[in-house]
Image (tube, grey):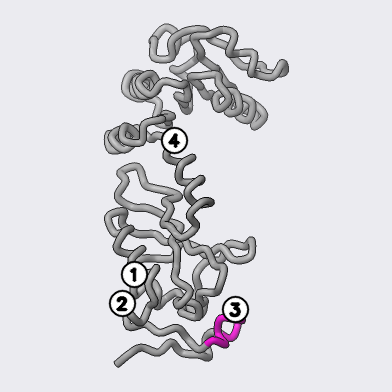
Amino acid sequence: MHYVIMGCGRVGSYLARNLEDAGHSVAVVDRDEAAFRRLPSSFEGRRVVGIGFDRDTLVAAGIEQAYAFAAVSSGDNSNILAARVARETYGVDHVVARIYDPGRAEIYERLGIPTVATVRWAADQVMRRLVPQQAVTVHQDRTGSVSIVDMPVDAAWIGTRYRDLEAATGTRVAYVARTGTALLPREDLVHQDGDTVHLVLATRDVERVEAVLTAPPSSITGVRPASSGTASSGHAEASHPTTRRP
């Protein structure tokens, strides 16, 4: 398949190298010819000097045969304009634009242009390490209405079955990270100390669910953890039913 990449910075050159290593044909567009120095000497794809949203430049890069187009230059406006030209003029279905302004990213996602908001992603990752007890969105659908969130959970939830946690919050557990392993939720899986919980939920509900899970379960939901013995084993959980307040 043929890929066209606008921008030969660190991201663009990385994409070009990896796509070519995977056996694809690649064309890289940049207005600065010196930027192509970032490409390895073994790179066999096209190097096209020009503006990424200029039609002649795109045609020279093979946009008419392209399977996908990535706009990853340093300019938000240029990236969005180029992505729209690729999709709307040349019918490229698979396009993505790198965006630095998170506000713009949300707008263009709603217009159907997939974006990667690098500033938000970087800030979220830093916050995740600086302030562990905070909900961090790790993925959103293109409309922004559904999220996968790394959700903090109060220690009082230890021993609670994840099916009860789902019922108490109105969410679904996407997966649980435990001691370096990702676990899919099963009927008898309980929350253990050190678990990182990833929930699927409506974006509008993130704050509500965070408030529920950062408080002891019995104080808000009426759910009590199973007996302490259930938290130590991933196999004996089913023999200790979760109790609820009357």
Distance from Cα at disc 4 to Cα at disc 2 = 35 Å
Say what secondary structure mark 4 lies in: helix
Do the residues bearing badges 1 and 2 touch, measured as CB atoms within 8 Å? yes
Q: What residue type is labelled 3?
A: Gly
Toward the viewer: 103 or 95? 103
* Marks 1 and 4, how far apart at CA: 29 Å
Residue named by callout 4? 119
Q: Position of residue 26 (x, y in %)?
A: 57, 21
Q: Is residue 71 visible?
A: yes
User: What is the C-alpha distance between the residues marked 1 and 3?
Assistant: 24 Å
- The structure residue drawn at horizontal position 43% and vertical position 61%, both measured from the top left corner, is 151
What residue is shown at x 46% (from left), y 62% (from top)? 174
Q: Residue at x 65, y 18 (%)?
A: 39
Say which of 180 and 61 sits in front.
180
Label 2 sits on residue: 220
**Tag shown at residue 234:** 3
What's the residue type where badge 2 is placed? Ile
Query: In the rendering, at what x and y percent does residue 29 appear?
Result: 51, 14
Secondary element under disc 2, as helix, strand or loop, is helix
What's the residue type where badge 4 is placed? Val
Magenta residues? 228-236
In the rendered image, the residue lying farthest to the front is: 130
The part of the image, by quadrant, that contains residue 84 is: top left
Residue 226 coordinates in the image, percent (x, y): 47, 86
The quarter of the displayed image where residue 87 is located? top left
Q: Which residue carries the number 1 mark?
A: 212
